[in-house]
Image (tube, rainbow, N blue to C red):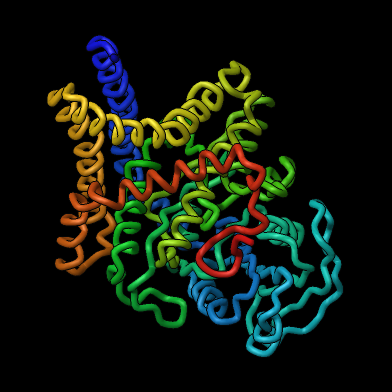
Amino acid sequence: MISTNVYLLIDAGLLTFFLLLNGFYAFILLLGFPVLIRKFKETGSEELNELLKSDHVPPISIIIPAHNEREIIHETISSVYHLDYPYVSLIVVNDGSTDGTLEVLIERYELSKVPPAIPAHLKTQKVRAIYRSKKLPNFIVVDKEKESQEDALNAGLNACTTPYYLATDADAMIEPDVLRKLARTLLTRPQTMGLGGALRVGNGCIIEDGLVKQVRLGKSYLTKMQTLEYLRGFFFGRLGWNMLGGPYNLSGAFNLYEKKTAIEVGGYGKQVPASDLDLTIRMHGKVHELKQHYNIEYVPDACIWLEVPQGYKDLSLQRQRWSCSLLDVCAKYKYMFVNPKYGRIGFLYLPYLILGEGIGPIVEAFAYLYVPFTFFMGVLNTRFLFLFLIIAWGFTSLLTFISIAMEQTTFKKYLSTSDVLKLIGLTFIENFGYRQMSIWWRIRGFFRFFSKNRYYREHPTRHSYKEE
């Protein structure tokens, strides 16, 4: 028989873990408010706004890796040419498509071959040809042999001729003022190496010619729940990290990097499931080694819209990959862990990723099993159960509610009162079913990290890069 003291010790351990983890989340949330205030001050600066309207802004290239995207690639290209920015170039990298993507691009944008004279800063699969558009300015297509999304991005980096580039997905809809908002940070903080922005769920929105005409909630249960996750993750989950030295990750679907630095650290890694996290951690680490000042930042008002998985299987694979990928990067950079040489990376970023994102789901799953076990054993501590639900579930609902409130008082993307009320209602429903599914997916990803089938040949994303 297990003694009462053992149960009390387990109760105390679980509550302490969730108090520390959620206390840190609260700390990050509070740190985000000064960032929002600073952003609003910069937005109201007449001098800065006049500068942004001028031509004195840095040139930026958009790099889009594409594999079998013939049905959707034109929408993303249209969104790029709606950008309100004077110096923008577009590089589409056709990564061995077999559905006629290249042929559609050649016909639609009047592409013609040009000499394949691009430097090989980063090693990639063979580049078969380079095309330039006669119809659209500063638009080239790099046609290469099939490899991976990371290899396609590296090929795009080789072809890039601007000091900064923005990497995004082939199904992303970029808001017209995104580059102006990113350039505001580039101009005010010249040592910037990387910037990230907000990802919004485009499922259900009305999109015409690459522009989001009307923001609406998706119809399916899974889509609505992901909308909540993205709101929570990109409001409270990213803002506060700016005050701690910058976010540990810039989302692969929307990130701007300094080209020179990205090439210096080796570009996008091969056989790295989380290439975005890997590249950002490498950048942080490299500059810490050189003891240089730098800035990596999240820009909350810069926004793109993208499609998220609508089916259970696709969403499950995505979340398993995220969990496995996170541990993969932590294992790769274990030499930075609690290493004074790497400062906040070793003492904050990696411990948070391992304990909060890696082990956290396992601890929560254990609590779900522990509660019914103690009930059937007749030793359930009702005080523990109440505190656990308040700390683990109640706090998450509060964070989500605050995120919705911040969204509606700042950027106000959702104009429909009905949609806002639905989101508020879903904050309470999330804990009953969806949260447990998410925990299960993340645990499967955790154990996949230790299996032989650890690596994905391709990304199981929303459309073309799928798991084999």
* Quadrant of the image containing the C terminus: bottom right
Q: Is residue 160 visible?
A: no
Q: Is residue 290 visible?
A: yes
**Front residue of this view, candidates 468 and 304:** 468
**Front residue of this view, candidates 44 and 182:** 182
| Residue 135, position as x, y percentages in the image | 65, 86
Residue at left 72%, top 49%? 270
On screen, residue 417 above or below 375:
below
| Residue 27, position as x, y percentages in the image | 31, 29
**Front residue of this view, candidates 422 and 379:** 379
Residue at left 35%, top 36%? 365
Residue at left 48%, top 36%? 246
* Quadrant of the image containing the N terminus: top left
**Front residue of this view, candidates 53 and 33:** 33
Residue at left 21%, top 45%? 402
| Residue 318, position as x, y percentages in the image | 49, 55
